[in-house]
Every structure is written in structure tokens, then in C-alpha cells.
Image (cartoon, grey):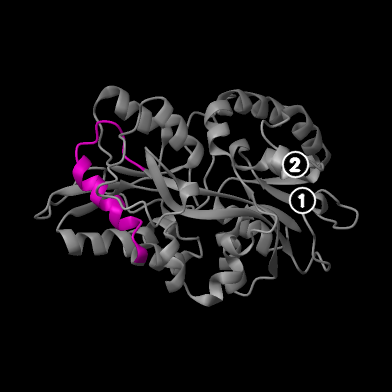
Amino acid sequence: MFARLGAVSLTMALIAGCGNSGSSSTEGGQPSAQGSGGSVTFVSWGGTTQDAQMKYWGKPFEEETGIKVVQDGPTDYGKFKAMVESGDVKWDVVDVEGDFAYQAAKDGLLEPLDFSVINKGDLDPDFVFDYGVGSFAYSFVNAYNTSKIKEKPQGWKDFFDQTAFPGDRTVYKWPTVGVLEMALLADGVEPSKLYPLDLDRAFRKLDELKPSIKWWQTGAQSQQLMANGEVSMGYVWNGRMYSLINDGAPVEIDWTQNIRTGDYLVVPKGAKNKEAAMKFIAHAVSVDAQAGFANETSYEPINVKSMGLVDSKLFPYLPSQHKESQVLLDVAYWAENKDKVIQQWNAWLLK
């Protein structure tokens, strides 16, 4: 679903994030037309996720305020940083992953949010801080192809057990999204003792599975690998698997120790339309906007009051309904440790 863009090197990898692949409805980052109330440039990850964000957030916001919403994307962290550092900021609201939101705040790249405009009282406190609020929540889950796996797995330990659960696996090719946590949980580490991560132990565990991993870098890749049976199990986004299940694919989900996190909406430091940006975010996290997006995508609303408007058929596929053994990804840890872990990750990939 998301795309993380950067130079292909030992310190940066080309990856895609939790949403959908494909290009966005880009209009160049600058308004092609001005509404009576000005404009705001919204940047996200493209594909059906950004389409749904515009359908339930952007278009109603334009109608209610007269402020034109211009789309750009996909989210590019290198471009984000370069804009802020140069003072030539063309983006106003950007959908980013949690580790970037916290690191960007620490590095002075974000505007503090105006909570006199944005009502944070109804938002899940796990996804609110001074410089960002949740866009939507999701979990990484263990999905399995029922034509390959007949017995339901029970946790990440089974993900590594290729004797009882034969076949290749697919895993997100990026370390900051719970892959190392997943390996440690599979190795018996208690959720309460995950952080700080024992990196050596995590990589040793991943060594066991590495020859059988088919990496995915976009949501579409994960879906294809799971649906066609090229892999029997996958470390994947819940929303992408719901889409497959809804289309009749032979895929089910094991929610044991699902790893929950979320995207954040942030405003780059020096954004030219900061006032409009705050209003846009306020609308995006409102009850109806969050509920509409959730019903379209099966990603979980950040506004807790939105759940009353979410179609009940989605409930079995929402992270909030599977909290018994759920693990919350520590984005603050990743904001602090990401760079050194990425170096170790890239070196491990090349072994």
C-alpha cells in the first residue's frame, strides 16, 4: 500500500508501504485550479488507499470548505526532507509511517498540530502526539493459503515451522515494520520484553527461514504471492488480505500476536497552507470520514466513535477485535534506532 522511495544502497532501500501499489492521481504538487477557499496539497501512497482517502476525506472537505484538495504522491521521505531543508515546501499534509513521523518531529521537520482545530478527544491515544495524528490503523498478520495449509497456524512460531506447515513464506522487505519483532516472538520472547530489540537474536531466527522467503515490496505483490499459492504463508497487512478474502481467494488469517501500527498525518515544516492543512486533518479524522474510509478499505478508523458506523461484516478483520495477544509496534523505538538497524538489515540481506 505505501511506497518508501530512496536511493538503492546499503543504507536506503526501495520499498512500498502498507497500502496499495501504483501511482497516485498526481497533479504535480501545485494547484491546477484554485477553489474559492484556497488549496491544500495532500500526499499519500497512491492506489486504492489514496483513492479512498480522496473519496471520503478530500472531496467532502472541498465541498464543505471551498478549499481545493490537490493530490500528489507517492510519499517520498527523501523529497519531504529536501523540501523542508530548502524552504521550498510544496506539500501541506502528508500520510507517513509512524517511525518517520516520530523521527521527523525529532529532527525538526514538522509543524506542531493545532489541536484547537483538530479534535483529538475522540482519537485513539495510541496514535496521537504533538506533531501527528493517525491516518488509519492496521496490523501485520500471519495469512495462509488454505489450498496449501490445511491446519490453522497458531502464532509466529508456526510461521517458522516448515515441517508442520510446508511451503515458502513472503515477508515485507523492510525492518522497521515489525519483521524483527515477529522473529523474536517466534523465538519465544514475551511481548512485554521485546524492546529494546535483541537484534542478533532476531537475525539468527530469520536465518532459519531466509532461503524460503519471497520478499514483497508492495501490497499488490503480497496479494499475488498469497492468492496464487506461490507461498503458503505471509507476513502481510490485514487490509490487503481482507480484499483477497472478499474476492474469494483461498486465504485466511491467523491473528495470534498480530502486530498493530498505523499511518500518521503530518504537516511539513514551512508548509505554505498550514491553516488549511489543519482543517483538512480535522476533517480526515472526523467520525464520518474515518468510518467511510474504513468501510471502503477495511483499515481501522483512528476515531473511536467511527466504529459505530463501520459495517459489522468487517469486524472479524479489524485489529481492535483481536487484542488478546496483540503487540503494539513501538514507533518511538524505531525513530531512535532506525538508521543503525537498516545498516545491519541491508548487510544481512547481502549475506
- Where disc 1 sits, the SS reads helix
Query: Considering the image in quadrants, where does the C terminus appear?
Result: top right
Residue for point 59% across, 37% down:
176
Residue 341, above or below 46 = above
Can you give x and y, in whole percent of width and height, for residue 21 in the image?
49, 52
Could you say which disc has been placed on residue 156 in the image?
1
Taking the image as shown, residue 64 lies to the left or right of residue 136, namely left
User: In the image, is 285 to the left or to the right of 337?
Assistant: left
Confirm whether the magenta stretch covers residue 283.
yes
* Mark 2: few/some/many CA within 10 Å (<14, 14-19, 20+): many
For the residues bearing labels 1 and 2, Cβ distance under 8 angstroms: yes
Q: Nearer the viewer, residue 228 or 117?
A: 117
Q: Residue at 19% x, 44% y: name it.
A: 275
Q: Nearer the viewer, residue 186 or 149?
A: 186
- Cα gap from disc 1 to disc 2, whole angstroms: 7 Å
Q: Amino acid at mark 1?
A: Trp
Question: Can you say whether 124 is above or below 80 in the image?
Answer: below
| Amino acid carrying mark 2 in the image | Ala
| Secondary structure under the numbered disc 2 in the rendered image | helix
Q: Which residues are magenta?
A: 266-287
Q: Is residue 33 left or right of residue 40?
A: left
> Is residue 344 in view from this perspective?
yes
Residue at the (33%, 54%) spot, across then down: 25
Q: Report which quarter residue 139 is drawn in.
A: bottom right
Location of mark 2 (residue):
183
